[in-house]
């Protein structure tokens, strides 16, 4: 029962953070491209890379941290469904280049960020 509380708390914080980043990106970068979704997915991938590397090296081991951070916060902060809908909307509005750019950037940057997160932790912890 306690596990669901950790996941729920992390999820509430992650979803709220995603909302704030999305609102900021619209205010600063505009609505021409789904920048907010790209930003949260890249940041979340970087954080997940660091976090999972930390767990594998037993820098962070307790299960509640995994539930709070990886499942709850990062699960709610990142968003594959919004990425999918953003991309579909771009295609439907004839913005094929932007849609393909969105797919390419999300894939390349998120995978790179996850790898970079794991690499950074390895460098820090030696």
Image: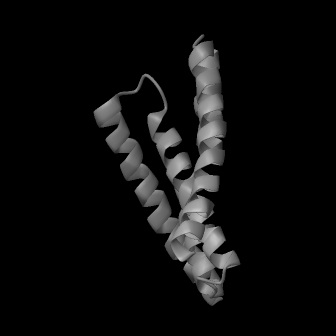
The residue sitting at the right extreme is 56
Q: In this view, does 26 lie above or below 6?
A: above
Q: What residue is rendered at 65% in x and 85% in y?
A: 63
- From the image, which quarter does the N terminus lie in? bottom right
Across and down, in percent, residue 41 comes to 55, 47
Q: Is residue 27 above or below residue 73?
A: above
The residue sitting at the left extreme is 27
- 109 and 86: which is toward the camera: 109
The residue sitting at the top extreme is 94
Q: In this view, does 10 lie above or below 117?
A: below
Q: Can residue 37 be seen in this view?
A: yes
Across and down, in percent, residue 59 comes to 59, 82
Q: What colouring does the structure picture have?
A: one colour
Q: In this view, does 74 lie to the left or right of 58?
A: left
The residue sitting at the front extreme is 126
Across and down, in percent, residue 71 comes to 63, 69
Q: What residue is rendered at 65% in x and 77% in y?
A: 55
Q: What residue is rendered at 34% in x and 30% in y?
A: 29
Q: What residue is rendered at 52% in x and 57% in y?
A: 77
Q: Is residue 72 visible?
A: no
- 43 and 20: which is toward the camera: 43
- 52 and 99: which is toward the camera: 52
- From the image, which quarter does the C terminus lie in? bottom right
Marks counted in the figure total: 0
Across and down, in percent, residue 123 comes to 55, 67
């Amino acid at each position: 029962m306690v596990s669901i509380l950790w996941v729920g708390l992390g999820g509430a914080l992650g979803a709220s953070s995603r909302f704030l980043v999305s609102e900021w990106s619209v205010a600063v970068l505009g609505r021409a491209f789904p920048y907010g979704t790209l930003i949260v997915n890249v940041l979340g991938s970087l954080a997940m890379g660091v976090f999972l590397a930390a767990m594998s090296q037993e820098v962070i081991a307790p299960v509640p941290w995994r539930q709070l951070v990886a499942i709850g916060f990062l699960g709610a902060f990142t968003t594959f469904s919004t990425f999918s809908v953003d991309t579909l909307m771009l295609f439907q509005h004839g913005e094929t280049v932007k849609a393909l750019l969105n797919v390419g950037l999300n894939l390349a940057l998120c995978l790179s960020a996850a790898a970079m997160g794991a690499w950074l932790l390895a460098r820090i912890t030696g």
